[in-house]
Image: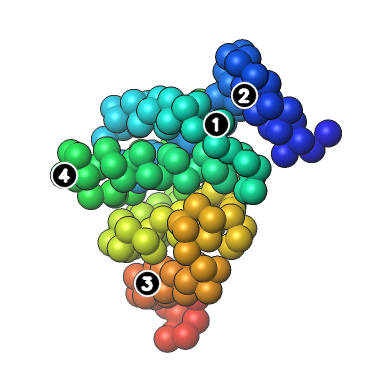
């Protein structure tokens, strides 16, 4: 049985009033939702509150869920909107913090860039990789909200262009444009460190 089929069975049970089925969906997706919110919200103390509100909203909205998109994608959209609403209420801007890249449980490295460059290398190489990771974080931090969200969903969460278009409620062409612009902005910040020329990426 595929993950989508398993979700569909649980959703049917939730619609019939089975609270345990919804708890199973929460267990399945809670950590991924918290990671997403953690990349939008600088204040780590808010992440769990926003995640909880996301699942409350999802539970209330499940009777209207028609399965036109994957449950995971639908839940992402609710999480993004809930985080944006919380940030507006607090008059804060979504920002990527370095702590958002660190896993709270399984000891993942602080970023993909650092992962790829630091394994078994010299102290100088490790230092350079940390500088690159910090530069990437700063570059993402400086992006507009739409570009930051698109590049996060694509590069960190691994969503397809179709799923990102669904989450962001925009055409796929717009998603492609945002991701291209975000990558260009990050490449621009990395050029002095990597010695790449205009038109090249890392």
Does residue 192 appear to the left or right of 29 in the view shown?
left
Secondary element type, mark 1: helix
Image position, residue 131 (x, y; %): 36, 57
Task: Using the numbered discs, state the Cα–Cα distance from disc 1 to disc 4 in whole angstroms.
Answer: 29 Å
Residue 48 appearing in the image: yes
Q: Residue at x 83, y 34 (%)?
A: 1
User: Pointer 4: residues within 10 angstroms few (<14), some, or many (20+)?
Assistant: few
Does residue 131 appear to the left or right of 73 in the view shown?
left
Q: Which of marks 1 and 2 is nearer the N terminus?
A: 2
Image position, residue 87 (x, y; %): 25, 42
Residue lying farthest to the bottom in this orientation: 198
Residue contact between numbered discs 2 and 3, judged by CB atoms under 8 Å: no
Image position, residue 64 (x, y; %): 55, 37
Which residue corresponds to mark 4? 91
Residue contact between numbered discs 1 and 2, judged by CB atoms under 8 Å: yes
Which residue corresponds to mark 2? 15
Residue lying farthest to the right in this orientation: 1
Q: Earlier in the sequence, mark 4 or mark 3?
A: 4
Task: Using the numbered discs, state the Cα–Cα distance from disc 2 to disc 3 in whole angstroms.
Answer: 44 Å
Image position, residue 167 (x, y; %): 50, 52
Which residue corresponds to mark 3? 185
Secondary element type, mark 3: helix
Q: Quadrant of residue 102?
A: top left
């Amino acid at each position: 049985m595929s993950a989508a089929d398993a979700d569909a069975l649980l959703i049917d049970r939730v619609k019939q009033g089975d609270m345990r089925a919804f708890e199973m969906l929460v267990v399945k997706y809670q950590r991924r939702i918290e990671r997403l919110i953690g990349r939008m919200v600088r204040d780590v103390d808010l992440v769990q509150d926003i995640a909880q509100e996301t699942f409350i909203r999802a539970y209330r909205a499940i009777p209207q869920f028609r399965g036109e998109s994957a449950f995971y994608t639908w839940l992402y959209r609710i999480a993004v909107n809930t985080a944006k609403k919380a940030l507006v209420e607090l008059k804060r801007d979504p920002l990527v913090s370095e702590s958002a890249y660190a896993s709270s449980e399984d000891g993942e490295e602080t970023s993909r860039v650092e992962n790829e460059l630091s394994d078994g290398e010299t102290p100088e190489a490790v230092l350079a990789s940390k500088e690159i990771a910090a530069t990437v974080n700063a570059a993402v931090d400086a992006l507009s909200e739409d570009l930051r969200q698109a590049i996060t969903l694509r590069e960190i969460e691994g969503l397809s262009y179709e799923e990102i278009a669904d989450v962001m409620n925009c055409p796929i062409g717009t998603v492609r444009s945002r991701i291209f612009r975000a990558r260009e902005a990050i490449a621009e910040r990395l050029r002095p460190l990597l010695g790449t020329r205009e038109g090249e990426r890392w």
